């Protein structure tokens, strides 16, 4: 019935330690043996997906930066990309600096960021990874340098204070030419206008000549909603946000208990 399975990473395919369980890896392998095409659709930059693509042996393109980039993480060939206007990048960085918001900018070559715990965690993770899976970080807040030297697919702003988060959202929604969504609590993802996992998946499906009814999608958060609505079958995990659960065809067990593998076995029967 289904030919393509698309997976969100954080909160879905990955556990809280940012690992893919042996059970999930085995379940994806069973899908591949059944002829399924496996696609990752994530808010992360492609640079931050390499270790997982390598582990589950994905041979095709992935959807990165919530759809602003479609490419294979180990080649230079891009299926699609769209970047933020440099002036918008400068304005958003200035808002972050004025209000002490943490930001991370996803670019082709590296992650440009302020110093923060998330970056430190990834830098520590780099030490455990193969050289070709490591992520380069550039630490700077110089908006002129950033806008003139890097193409920004996405800006992630991290703000855990809910009132400050809401205030930031109100400011940014006054901008034209942006797509804004939430990928985790306190995470605001900013991409060029018209960018979404749904639109990127539609693009890939047409390239692969796969109909919507032949797609099963797995996701847990707000940036997955349009993709889940679009797919022929929508699956979430117990930790998914309520708005995702409302539209899901099946709610599996928690992502920390290999909810993807559980759904593949108990709902898809594979």
Image (cartoon, rainbow, N blue to C red):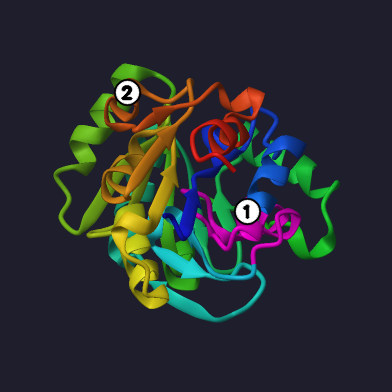
- Nearer to the camera, 194 or 143: 194
* Horizontal side, residue 29 vs residue 255: left or right: right
Residue 131 position within the rendered picture, expressed as x and y whole percent measured from the top left: 83, 62
Nearer the viewer's eye, disc 1 or disc 2? 1
Name the image quarter holding the N terminus.
bottom left
User: In the structure shown, which secondary structural element does the residue marked by tag 2 occupy?
Assistant: helix
Name the image quarter holding the C terminus.
top right
Q: CA distance from mark 1 to mark 2?
A: 27 Å
80 shown above or below 236: below
Q: Is residue 226 visible?
A: yes
User: Image quarter for residue 165?
Assistant: top left
Residue at x 24%, y 54% (from the top left corner)? 178
- Nearer to the camera, 30 or 207: 30
Residue 48, which numbered label?
1
Q: Within the magenta stretch, is there residue 186?
A: no
- Nearer to the camera, 91 or 16: 16
Q: Residues within 10 Å of mark 1 (few under 14, many from 20)?
A: many
* Horizontal side, residue 181 vs residue 158: left or right: left
Residue 120 position within the rendered picture, expressed as x and y whole percent measured from the top left: 70, 38
The answer to which of marks 1 and 2 sits earlier in the sequence is 1
Residue 239 position within the rendered picture, expressed as x and y whole percent measured from the top left: 48, 21
User: Image quarter for residue 153?
Assistant: bottom left
According to the image, label 2 marks what residue? Answer: 164
Residue 20 position within the rendered picture, expressed as x and y whole percent measured from the top left: 70, 40
Q: How many dots with numbers?
A: 2
Residue at x 62%, y 54% (from the top left corner)? 49
User: Image quarter for residue 22?
Assistant: top right
- Nearer to the camera, 17 or 59: 59
Q: Is residue 144 visible?
A: no
Q: Which residues are magenta?
A: 31-58
User: In the structure shown, which secondary structural element does the residue marked by tag 1 occupy?
Assistant: helix
């Amino acid at each position: 019935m289904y030919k393509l399975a698309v997976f969100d990473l954080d909160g879905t395919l990955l556990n809280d330690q940012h690992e893919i369980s042996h059970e999930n890896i085995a379940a994806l392998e069973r899908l591949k043996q059944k002829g399924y095409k496996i696609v990752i659709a994530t808010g992360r930059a492609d640079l931050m997906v390499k270790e997982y693509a390598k582990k589950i042996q994905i041979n095709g393109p992935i959807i990165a930066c919530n759809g602003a980039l479609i490419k294979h993480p180990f080649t230079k060939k891009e299926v699609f990309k769209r970047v933020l206007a440099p002036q918008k990048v400068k304005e958003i960085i200035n808002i972050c600096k004025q209000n002490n918001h943490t930001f991370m900018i996803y670019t082709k070559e590296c992650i440009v960021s302020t110093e923060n715990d998330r970056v430190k965690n990834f830098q520590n993770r780099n030490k455990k990874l193969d050289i070709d899976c490591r992520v380069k970080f550039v630490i700077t807040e110089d908006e002129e340098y950033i806008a003139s030297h890097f193409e920004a697919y996405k800006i992630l702003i991290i703000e855990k204070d809910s009132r400050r988060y809401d205030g930031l959202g109100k400011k940014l929604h006054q901008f034209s030419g942006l797509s804004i969504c939430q990928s985790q609590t306190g995470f605001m993802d900013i991409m060029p206008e018209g960018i979404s996992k749904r639109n990127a998946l539609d693009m890939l499906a047409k390239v692969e000549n796969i109909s919507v009814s032949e797609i099963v999608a797995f996701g847990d958060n707000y940036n997955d909603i349009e993709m889940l609505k679009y797919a022929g079958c929508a699956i979430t995990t117990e930790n998914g946000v309520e708005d995702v659960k409302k539209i899901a065809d099946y709610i599996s067990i928690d992502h920390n208990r290999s909810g993807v593998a559980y759904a593949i076995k108990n709902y898809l029967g594979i």
